[in-house]
Image (cartoon, rainbow, N blue to C red):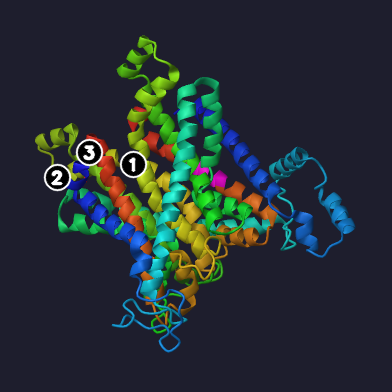
Amino acid sequence: MTLAYLLRRLGAIVIVLAIVTLAVFGITMVLPGNAALMILGEHSTPDSLAAMERLLGLDRPVWVQYGSWVWGVLHGDFGMSLRLSLPVAKVVGDAFWNSAWLALIALVGVTVIAIPLGALAALKRGSAWDLVIGFFSYVGTAMPEFVTATLLLILLASPEWPLFPAGGFVAPSENMAGFLRHVILPAGTLGLILMAHISRQVRSEMADVLSSEYVRAARLKGLRGRRVVWRHALPNAMAPAVAVISLDIGYLLGGIIVVEEIFAWPGLGRTLIYALQNRDLPVIQAITLVLAVVYALSNLLADIVIAWLDPRVRHA
Amino acid sequence: MRDVLRNPVGVVGLVLLTIVIGAALFGPWLAPYDPQLFHARSRLQGPSAEFWLGTDQYGRDLMSRILHGAPSTVFFGLGATALGVGVGSVIGVVAGVAGGKIDSIIMRVLDGLLAMPELLFTLLIVTFLGGGTTQAMLAVAVTFAPGMARIARSSVLSVRTREYVMAAIARGESRAWIVGREVLPNAVGPIIVEATIRVSFAIMIGATLGFLGLGAQPPSTEWGLMVAEARQFMFRNPWCVVVPGVAIAITAMGFNLFGDALRDAFDPKRNRS
């Protein structure tokens, strides 16, 4: 893990982002109806359309438009939203923090619960614990977010017995308790699915490590069981688990789209669906870029953590 | 196959798959009522002798709607996966066999496409194509292709330097013969395993698109759409969202479990579960 390695990875990320933005730009370019038509509506005259296209710079060649968009983004200017008459940076910026809170709470909550559960299942292989955790993780991965969300709503937010609000958002700066009450169901939905995934992975890694030579050696040396698990087995099972968590961030970024839509959470996902429905092209482009950046950086972060956990990778 | 059946995970998966595929093939004939028929006097009812799984907000029989929705839901998953796996495998095999510059260009582009979360990519393509079942299926297929291409490429690469391929090269066999007879048959295992598990993702994404109103359109009996339509009434009759939801989960779980068992059967080292 040297500086040169980090720089090389960052370089690769820049190339990947260039491809992502080109692809998204390409898709939004060929969407039926351009931005001028979106602003003026269906009944606009050809003259006014042409004038608006000139105003927005849509009459320029596509690569010039792409270049000026990239130039703007590099200077923090994402353009104006076509629907909300607000700068895209403001719309997406606010949504970004709301989503970040939701994703972070789901991820941290899950990691804290799933890793011990997976380890427990591996330690008590074949026991009732193992079966229950295994069954639960298969069910969890087989349910799309909207099904999990709907089931949670029926159980915990029904009008007769409303433990939690069925949707909405309170800013944490205004009312922390209100924020927490609102975040539990959406974060729980994301968490249940992630938990299934991560605990299963930890279990299988842990089972591998427990049957390895060095754990046997540690046992034969006469170390206590707890010390073997904590000091020898778990650290070695962690690196692959972190790899899975980093893959799951990609899932999480997709999952928030549906979950935010269901629970009316004003984050990137809900904004994206609004933008897609209304063909708000600058907002679509900005959100896609943000999600791709977060995904790429979290993968890099995961690789650094894996290297830190595994000395063999660290010195390679 | 025998290895799959020796594994309890595989047996459960196979049982679920049999039920689901049976429902997909024969469901429409087994359904007791017309799935679009309104029973105005018995709306939003729980299960009864007359309506085994209850009724929805128009009094349509849920059992009949689930059985009629089975073919479209299951074949959506199979179709989207087959398309995505087919296209992806061709790209991956080309990259793996060609090597060199072609390989690195293809891989760079795939990396770019894989840098987007799957659902986001699918949503973009569906918006581009316009909503509807066929469009949703194409979108899922396009989303799957880059990941499949990667797996196909890496399994081709792992086979390419084996002795039997070297022997074929030394014998002076043609390139097409080597790819068709030596490389592909040995590289196909991981592709099949991944494809089986992907069917469950395809079914879940398809249902999610239906739920968001971007896939199948009313009055279709697609399961995701059924959940979306009944959501307003879910507190009055939970059955009308729970029944399609559980149906989706059972189907996805069947393909998932079966795929896991297949993976273990293909790879004896991974015999853990």
Q: Which of the chains bears the disc numbered 3?
A: A
How many numbered callouts? 3
C-beta proximity under 8 Å, tags 1 and 3: no
Q: Quadrant of residue B74?
A: bottom left
Between the C-alphas of marks 1 and 3, the distance is 25 Å
What's under tag 3, amino acid-wise?
Answer: Val
Q: Quadrant of the N terminus of chain A?
A: top left
- For disc 3, the marked residue is A209
Q: Residue at x 43, y 78 (%)?
A: B60
Say if B39 sits above or below A247 in the image: below
User: Which range of residues does the magenta coloring cover?
Assistant: A292-301
- For disc 2, the marked residue is A225
Picture disc at residue A120: none
Observer-nearest residue: A260 or A164? A260
For label 1, the SS is helix
Between the C-alphas of marks 3 and 2, the distance is 14 Å
Between the C-alphas of marks 1 and 2, the distance is 37 Å
| Side of B20 where A262 appears, left or right | right
What's under tag 2, amino acid-wise?
Answer: Gly
State the image coordinates of residue B20 (x, y, percent, origin top left).
32, 59
- For disc 1, the marked residue is B193
Q: Residues within 10 Å of mark 2 (few under 14, many from 20)?
A: few
What's under tag 1, amino acid-wise?
Answer: Val
Observer-nearest residue: B50 or B7? B50
Q: Quadrant of the C terminus of chain A?
A: top left
Q: Residues within 10 Å of mark 1 (few under 14, many from 20)?
A: many
Mark 1 or 2: the one toward you: 1
